[in-house]
Amino acid sequence: MMSDANDTSSSISVRLVHTLGGHTSDVNTVIFSPTHSASPLLASCSSDKTIRLWNLSDQSSTTLTRHTYQVHCLAFSPILSESNDATVKYMASVSTDGTCLLWDLATISVLKEYKHDSGSPIRVCQFSSDGVLLATAGDDELINLWDITALSSRPVKIFTGHSASIVALRFFSNLLISGSFYGDLKIWTVDSSFTGAVHFEREAHDLGVNCLDVLSPSSTESHHHHHPPYLIASGGNDNQIKLWHCSSSSKHQLTHIRTLKRHSCAVMCVAFGIRHYLASGSGDKTIIIWNYESGELVHRFDAHTRYVTCCSFSLDGQYLASGSNDRMVNLWKIDYHDTENGLHDAKEKKLQFKSHSIDQWTEEMVHQWAEQLNVKINVNLTGNDLLSKSDSEILDLFNGNEQLLNELSALRHRHFVKQISSKRADQNPKSNEVNQENLPNEFLCPITHELMTDPVCGPGAGKGTQCARIAEYCIEPSFHDSYILTFLNSSCCSDTGSRFRTTVYSPSVSPSKYGYVHLSAGDLLREEAAKPDSSLGKEINEHIKNGSIVPVAVTCKLLENAMKKSGKENFLIDGFPRNQDNVNGWKESVGDRVNVQCVLFFDCDEQTCVARCLERGKGSGRTDDNEASLKKRIVTYNDSTRPVIQLFEKENLVKHIDASNDVDKRFGEYLKYGLKGAVFALPCLITLMDKVATVSLVAGKSMQPLLNPTGLNSDWVVIKRWDIDDYFLQKGDIISLESPREPQVYMIKRVKALENEIIYDTIKQKETRVPRGHIWVEGDNKRDSYDSRHFGCIPRGLVTGRALYVIWPPNRFGTKLTLHDSQDDDE
C-alpha cells in the first residue's frame, strides 16, 4: 500500500483497522451516524440491492433487503441532542427501483415509501438540519422535497431546472445545493415558494459532477463576516476537487476558492473531517487527505484494489470509512500529529520545484517532487534524467509505481508541447505545421495522429489521450432542416474510475412505434459490402482487404441514402459516431441537413456488457464477439468514443439509461422526448452554449417589432456570454434566458424590472415586488409573448447572456438591441 504513514514530517498517519466483507457488488455509499458515542453506527449500501448496518466491535452486520434494484445512497437523520446517549432515529435509502425508503432504526423497519411521479431511478437523498425535510433526486432531473412528519405521501415542493441526472445533493442553512452529470451546480431556496434555482455554476466540472460535501461555518474558524460562509467541496469527472464559499445571506452565490488537482482519475467522493481536513476518493484507487485551508496534500494512500466510490469521516474525525467496487468497506484509523512548521516547510519545498520547468530540476528538486507524491527514491536523478528515460525505466526505478509515472507523463507532455510551441513561434508565426517525424508515439493522438495538447492520464496506462480537435467541434441544432436524429452510441469502459457504460438495444421497444426509423451504421456497411454490384461495396471490401479503415464519407453516404430511401424524417442511428473522425465526416457530409435531438447512452457494468456480447456472438455469426476482441474494443472506446460522448454531454444532448435492468420504459420515454423536442422547440430561441459569445436564431413574434418585424423567423442575434454571472443587468436590456418552466428551452425577453422594484402585472391586474436576486422580463409584443406575466419573476441564475445586435439578414445587420429601440407599450 502506497502510504506515508512512517513519514514523521506528515501531519497525520493512516492505518487500516478493519476490512468489512459481505457485499457482493459495488459499494455505493458508506456513512457514519452523527453520534458522539465511542461506537457510532456505520451503514453501507451496494449494487447488490442490500443495505448493511455494521457493528464495529465485532465486524458483524445486519442486512436490509427491501430494495429490488441497486441502492445508490443512504442518509441518517440528524441528532438534535448533544447527549452522548442520543441515537439516530431514521435512515433514508434510495435505489434504481425508483423508491426512497424511510427506515425506523429502532425497529429496523420501513416507515414510509416515497416515489417520484416519473418512477425514475433515485440516486441521492439528504435530510435537512432539523430532520423534518428529506430531499431526493435522480434521473428525472427533479428534486423532490418531503416532510417526513406529514401524513401525505406527496412532496411539499419539487425543484426543476437541471438537465441531466442529479447525483449529488446537500442541505445547508435554508438552502440546497445539487450537482448533475451535466457538470453544473445549482442552489435552491427551501423556505420559498419559488421552485427554480437561485444561482448556478453552469460549468463547475465540465465532464460532470460526482459528489458534494458542505462544511458549516460553526466547524471553521472563519467568523470575520456578518454572514460567515459555508465551505463546499465538489468533485467531478475532470479529476478535480473545487472548493467554494456560499453565504447564507440573501446573495446565495458560489465563490470559487481553489481547485485541487492531484488525482489522476475521476473524483468519486469528498468528505470534510476535523482540523481543516478534507478526504477525497478517486478512480485512481487512492484516497487523498487535504488541508482545505492551504490546499496542500497532507497524505495519500492506496485505499482499495479498484476505484474508491465513497468515503466518510466519523463525527470525532478519528476514523475514515471507504467503499469501492472491489465490494469491500475499509475502516481507517486517523492519527493526528500536526506540526505547523512541517506544513510550512512542505509548502516551501513545493514552491521551490514548481517554480522551475522540469528540465531545470536539480536532484534535490526531484526528491521534493517525489516526496509530494509520498514516494521515497534511493537514486539521484535530475529533471533531464526524468525526461530522457523510458516509461519502463521509470517503473523499474520507482518500483512499478504507476501513479508516479502518470504524474511524470503529464509533466513531460506539457514540457514537450511548450517546446514545440516555442519552435513554432520562432520559425514561422503563420505556420501551423509541425515536423512530427521525430515525435514520440505517446504524444500523438491515436485517432488523428496529431500532436495532443491536453493529455488525460489514467492508472495502468502511464499516459492518456485527448486530442485538441475534440473540443473544437459542436453540432449546431437547426430546426428548419430535413431530418431529426437520435444517436444511440455504443460504449463500454475499463476499470479506470469512470462509470461503466455499454450498448443495450431492447428489441421489444420498436423505434417505429414513436415515428423513428432505426439505422445501424455497422449493419449498413456489412450489407453494402455483401452486394456484388455495388461501387460502395467494392470500396468497403477493398479497405477490409488492405486492413485500412473505411472512410467516414462512405459510412455517411450509406446513412444518407438509407434516410432518403425510407421517405421518413425521424431516425435512430445506432453505433455512430464512434470517434472524432466520424463527427467531422458527418458534419461535412450531411451536418447542414439534420438536427440532432439527443444521444441515448446505456449504462451497465463491464461484466454485463461482455456477457451480453458473448451471448450475442453465439447466434450473430460475428467473429469479433469474443473476449480478446472485446478487450480491444474497450480500449478503443476509451481512446476514441468516450471523448465524443463528452462532447455531446457538453451540449446537453446525452440522455442516460440504466441498462443493467429492464430498459424498455426509459428507452421509449426518451424516444418520445426527442419527438417532443422537435415540435416544442420551434417557437423558442435556440441558444448554442458558449463561454464568450454565440449567434442565435430568434423565432416567434414575442419581440416584434424590434425582432422579426416581417413575421418571418429570420433574425440572428449575437448573444454575449462572457462574465454573465457578474454582469450588471439594467432595465431595458434584452437577454437570453432558460425557461423557468421548461428546462433546456431558451427564450429572449426584455428586462422590465430589477430586484426590489414594483411592477404592475397586466394579466393579474396587481402590483408585484421583484424579490432579491430576481428580475421581471417581458416580450415587446405583449399580445404574443410568454413571459413573467405568466411564470412570475425569474432568478438571475437563469440568465444565459445579453443580446447585443442583429447580424442577419443583411438588410438588418448592425441593428442595436438597446433601450431606445424598444416599443415599450403596455397594451
Image: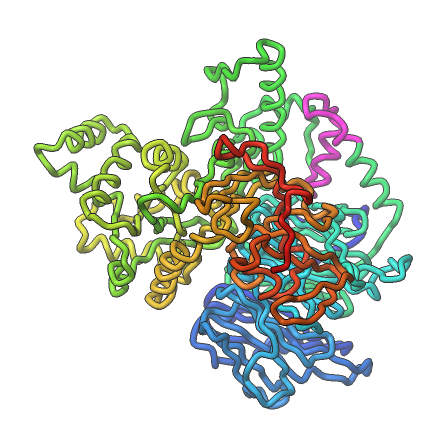
Residue 508, image quadrant: bottom left
Q: Which residues are magenta?
A: 352-376
Residue 41 vs residue 375, the one in the foreground: 41
Residue 541 vs residue 314, the one in the foreground: 541
Q: Is residue 361 magenta?
A: yes
Q: Position of residue 623 (x, y in %)?
A: 21, 45
432 is higher (above) or lower (below) than 721: above
Q: Is there any visible trace of residue 6 in the rendered image?
A: no
202 is higher (above) or lower (below) than 768: above
Number of numbered discs present?
0
Q: Position of residue 690 (x, y in %)?
A: 57, 41
The overriding secondary structure of the stretch rendered in magenta is helix
Q: Is residue 531 magenta?
A: no
Asked which colour scheme the image uses, the reply is: rainbow
Quadrant (top left/top right/bottom left/bottom right) for the C terminus: bottom right
Residue 529, image quadrant: top left
**Residue 318 placement, left or right of 551:** right
Q: Position of residue 445 (x, y in %)?
A: 46, 30
Residue 581, image quadrant: top left
Q: Position of residue 34 (x, y in %)?
A: 72, 74
Q: Residue at x 36, y 57 (%)?
A: 675
Q: Residue at x 50, y 25 (%)?
A: 451
Q: Residue at x 63, y 31 (%)?
A: 411
**Residue 626 placement, left or right of 395:** left
762 is higher (above) or lower (below) than 574: below
**Residue 114 placement, left or right of 348:** left
Q: Is there any visible trace of residue 535 in the rendered image?
A: yes
